[in-house]
Image (cartoon, grey):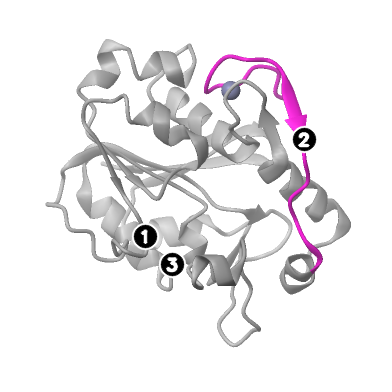
Amino acid sequence: MINTCPVCGNSEFNYAPVLWNDLISEWQLAENEVKYIDRQQGFFCVGCGNNLRSMALADAILRAYNFSGSLEQFVESDSAKTLMVLEINEAGGLTPVLKKLPNHRLVCYPEHDMTCLSFESATFDLVLHSDTLEHVYNPVAGLSECCRVLANNGHCIFTIPVIVDRFTRSRAGLSPSYHGSPTESGGNLLVQTEYGVDMWKDVLLAGFSSITVHCLEYPAGLALIARHY
Ligand SMILES: [Zn+2]
């Protein structure tokens, strides 16, 4: 169980469930799955406001660079100053922290097509996205673009909601399911893929050399570290 926020170092947390009945039934979530997805999205740090999913992403970044401190301290460190970082969609409340990096770029999907990134190959050391891939029509194409823009030995670190006791399924042919309100988002939050225990396949199909499941808290606080070397 988490006791210190990896983003800001605070140790006070709060919780407000976020799932609603339509999404629970479309996703066919069992009771225990509702519980951990609610915790992933609704358990948050009082200090910085980041939820467990964003804290897992931050923790994975710190682990990938062997940094023993908070993300707020990491972005001020010498080792982070030279990092070329691409963030695809705002990664929860991490964006204001990541923006302190001198070489940070933020692009937004779908305005900026994740399956056709407008960057030269081998540009970035670190590519980040958080709960975006499940909305991409062709997730392998999205990940292979992340892989292409990464320099040798680069990291693509990301989160997706994973239901750990079932296999991945495409929602093609199923009723539309949205994360967030379809009217507010203009349909951008339409779910294309419901990820399960075989979520590693898309990463390796996209051309990455390895994938690590980083666990801040199981099963609600997982982040994936894909490496290209
Ligand atoms: Zn915090």
- Residue position marked by numbered label 2 in the rendering: 15
Q: Name which residue lies at 24% across and 27% down.
A: 83
Q: Residue furthest front?
A: 184
Q: Residue furthest right?
A: 31
| Disc 2: CA contacts within 10 A as few (<14), some (14-19) or many (>=20) | some
Quadrant for the N terminus in the image: top right
- Magenta stretch encompasses residue 7: yes
Are discs 2 and 3 less than 8 Å apart at CB?
A: no
Q: Position of residue 169 (x, y in %)?
A: 61, 72
Identify the amino acid type marked 1.
Answer: Tyr
Q: Position of residue 113 (x, y in %)?
A: 29, 65
- Residue 147 is left or right of residue 135, and the answer is left
Distance from the alpha carbon under mark 2 to that under mark 3: 29 Å
Quadrant for the C terminus in the image: top left
- Residue position marked by numbered label 3 in the rendering: 136
- Magenta stretch encompasses residue 100: no
Whether label 3 lies within 8 Å of ligand 1 gets the answer no
Identify the amino acid type marked 3.
Answer: Val
Are discs 2 and 1 less than 8 Å apart at CB?
A: no
Seen in the picture, residue 53 relative to 216 is either above or below; the reply is below
Per the picture, the main secondary structure of the magenta-coloured stretch is: loop
Q: Which stretch did the figure color magenta?
A: 1-21
Any part of residue 146 in sight:
yes
Seen in the picture, residue 89 relative to 179 is either above or below; the reply is above
Any part of residue 218 in sight:
no
- Mark sitting earlier along the chain (2/3): 2
Q: Nearer the viewer, mark 2 or mark 3?
A: 2
Are discs 1 and 3 less than 8 Å apart at CB?
A: yes
- Residue 1 is left or right of residue 118, and the answer is right
- Residue position marked by numbered label 1 in the rendering: 109
Q: Name which residue lies at 38% across and 65% down.
A: 140
Q: In this orientation, which residue lies closer to the viewer: 215 or 106?
A: 106
